Image: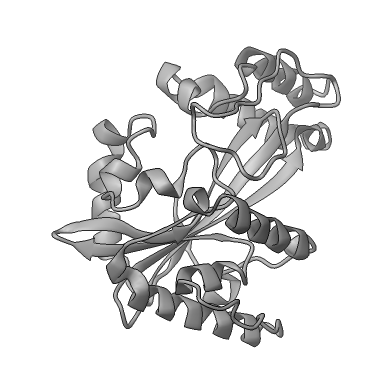
């Protein structure tokens, strides 16, 4: 799974996009709440614990959390405080089940489609999940401890910097070419963390989307070369899952040029 040990001092990321991200989250919760929030009835205690540790973390980092919005599920109250999307998993009938979450900035999925599902149902669209990853992921969640939180990162290259990307089947962004400066493509990186809560024994999954224009790689041919090797290794299923707006061959050509100092 490519996870690394997480220092809880670095659990969340706060940066200059904080105000814009929180405002956008508030807009989405107001306009399309059923798409970005979902919860099962038995999730409140775990969500309340998540809210408490979120407020404590912000205070420890000299960030005064906003007052409660009022009449909200605690996972929404927590999500209003951070730039990360928040998902709660609880052990039910020998499976880790998604019981609550606020996911405003997904990469082509929806919390409404995943609520109440176990891990294999959540990850069904992921390339090679059933054949190669299912048992490892289940075992990993079972073994995750309060004392050993983890983080990982994945990435996509997409022809948009829109944070709220709806599920496949909705509006899709496409590209037919990539200019020398990398437009219209953006590197979309997800910083993900997993930590187990000490009181409820739930697992909290955070997802922070960070964006950078593809063109920054013109100054980092070494990274362009690593991305090129990765993209070239993708089989058909992986290419279909990791959407590039239909510009996979164009991306390979662009990375090939940049990695050899040609742009």
Q: Visible in this render: residue 7?
A: no
* Nearest to the observer: residue 43 or residue 146: 43
How many dots with numbers? Answer: 0
Q: Name the colouring of the figure.
A: one colour
- Is residue 200 visible in the rendered image? The answer is yes
Nearer to the camera, 166 or 72: 72
Image quadrant where residue 54 sits: bottom right
Task: Name the quadrant containing residue 177.
Answer: top right
Quadrant of the snapshot with the C terminus: top right
Tell which of 230 and 160 is nearer to you: 160
Q: Residue at point 64% right, 31% down?
A: 157
Give the vertical position of 126 relative to 164 (above or below). above
Q: Residue at x 78, y 24 (%)?
A: 258
Residue visible at 42% across and 79% down? Answer: 48
- Residue 161 placement (x, y as % from top left): 72, 39
Q: Is residue 65 above or below residue 1?
A: below
Q: Position of residue 153 (x, y in %)?
A: 54, 49
Furthest toward the left, the residue is 93
The percent position of residue 15, horizontal first and vertical second, equals 75, 64
| Relative image position of residue 213 (x, y in whole percent) | 78, 37
């Amino acid at each position: 799974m490519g996870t690394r040990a997480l220092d809880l001092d670095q659990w969340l990321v706060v940066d200059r996009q904080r105000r814009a991200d929180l405002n956008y989250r508030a807009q989405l919760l107001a306009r399309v709440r059923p798409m970005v929030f979902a919860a099962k009835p038995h999730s409140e205690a775990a969500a309340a614990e998540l809210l408490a540790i979120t407020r404590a973390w912000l205070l420890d980092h000299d960030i005064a959390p906003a007052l409660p919005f009022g009449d909200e599920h605690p996972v929404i109250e927590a999500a209003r405080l951070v730039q990360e999307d928040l998902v709660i998993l609880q052990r039910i009938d020998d499976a880790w089940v998604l019981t609550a979450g606020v996911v405003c900035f997904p990469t082509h999925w929806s919390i409404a489609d995943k609520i109440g599902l176990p891990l294999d149902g959540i990850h069904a669209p992921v390339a090679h999940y059933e054949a190669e990853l299912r048992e490892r992921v289940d075992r990993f969640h079972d073994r995750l401890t309060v004392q050993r939180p983890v983080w990982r990162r994945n990435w996509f290259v997409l022809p948009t910097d829109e944070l709220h990307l709806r599920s496949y089947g909705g509006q899709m962004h496409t590209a037919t070419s990539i200019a020398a400066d990398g437009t219209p493509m953006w590197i979309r990186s997800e910083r993900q963390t997993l930590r187990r809560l000490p009181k409820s024994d739930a697992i909290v999954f955070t997802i922070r989307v960070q964006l950078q224009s593809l063109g920054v790689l013109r100054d980092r041919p070494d990274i362009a070369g690593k991305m090129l090797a990765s993209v070239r290794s993708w089989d058909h299923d992986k290419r279909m899952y990791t959407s590039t707006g239909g510009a996979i061959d164009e991306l390979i050509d662009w990375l090939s040029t940049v990695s050899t100092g040609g742009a």
